Image (tube, rainbow, N blue to C red):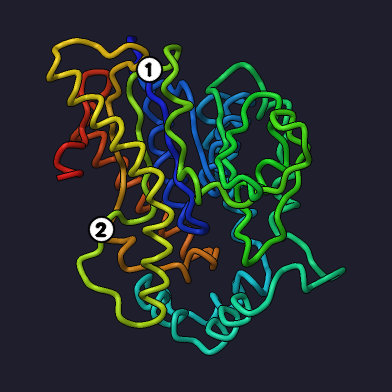
Amino acid sequence: MAKKRINLALQGGGAHGAFTWGVLDRLLEEEDLEIAAISGTSAGAMNGAALKSGWIEGGAEGARAKLDWLWGKLGAVHDMRMTTWLAGLMPDTTGLMNTALEYSLPFTFADTVSRLSSPYALGPFYQNPLRQIAEAFEYEKVCAREGPCLFIGATNVRTGRIRVFSGDEMSAEVLLASTCLPTLFKAVEIDDPQTGQREAFWDGGYTGNPALFPLFGQEYPEDILIVNINPLERADVPMTPQQIQNRINEISFNSSLLRELRVISYAQQMRRAWDRNLDGMKNINIHMIADDALMTELSVTTKLVPSPFLLVRMKMAGRNAAEAFLRDHKGDLNARSSVDLDAMFL
């Protein structure tokens, strides 16, 4: 059976990363799909590490099982800063849960405190609730040369530049760095051989959500499938403080991805205009799986609430979106882009 080889680009987005869980769960059922490389940030980095280590353990079924394990652990996280305990008081409807959380007094109080205080103010009481999960990965499998190549992005606090980790560099600290929201968690410090310094890192979403350029190598297929969590567009102008802050968050976390897509679009236009390949720039086919209708019901509040109801809802939405993509665009893989980049940047 001839396989279609693809690269995956996995966005971050907190609990909304369970949407990617569902997408990957469905894609891994396709026997004629081969995942050659993965670039992930934040929740996308967690998903990528789970897929890679699970694949080494037991192929596609092992990857699906490891993703189930990961989100089972994330759904059990209890931390006041992530407001998980509020989920039990929320209605079992995604939109209503989002609205109830946005305007709840406890969430408003916690949000205000996060803007006026710092995780460093907690002193000896500070802990990162994701550490136990990150340390539970078997890094000899995450770092293995077999299976999909894995790239994880984090933001260097000192330089403001993206740092992409791969291969033997993978560790619990790298995963924690990629998921480090600075209003919630202390910067993660790593001895970086690239700079020869001990560097501090924040969430990779600020500089690459996710980074596409690691997937441009000639050894990887031309097709990049982006699993998009943050809506690119919203029809309504935000008016409330919560809506404004949420849209700022979405725009800032999409900006690096849009810049890279614009570069790809420009290169493709030049190739068509000159009717030849550009030196050092292979053809790139872009595909995207998203559910903007669902994601526009949500906001940054539900990203911080990994409630079991929300995670299952996100997973099913991801599976459905992947099913629709495979039905409509599987034939485009290894043939052409299914995203019209020219129209995107008109």
Residue found at x 19% / y 22%: 270
| Foreground: disc 2 or disc 1 | 2
Q: Nearer the viewer, residue 69 or 194?
A: 194
For the image, the number of numbered tags is: 2
Based on the displayed image, in which of its 4 quarters is residue 219 positioned?
Answer: top left
**What percent of the width, then of the height, locates residue 47?**
54, 42
Q: Which mark is residue 247?
A: none
Q: Secondary structure at mark 2?
A: loop
Q: Which mark is residue 221?
A: 1
- Above or below for 340 versus 215: below
Based on the displayed image, in which of its 4 quarters is residue 234 positioned?
Answer: bottom left
**What percent of the width, then of the height, locates residue 180?**
63, 54
Q: Disc 1 marks which amino acid? A: Pro
- Above or below for 317 versus 106: above
On-image quarter of the N terminus: top left
Residue found at x 68% / y 41%: 174
Q: Nearer the viewer, residue 66 or 99?
A: 99
On-image quarter of the C terminus: top left
**What percent of the width, then of the height, locates residue 142?**
66, 29
- The residue where tag 2 is placed is 233
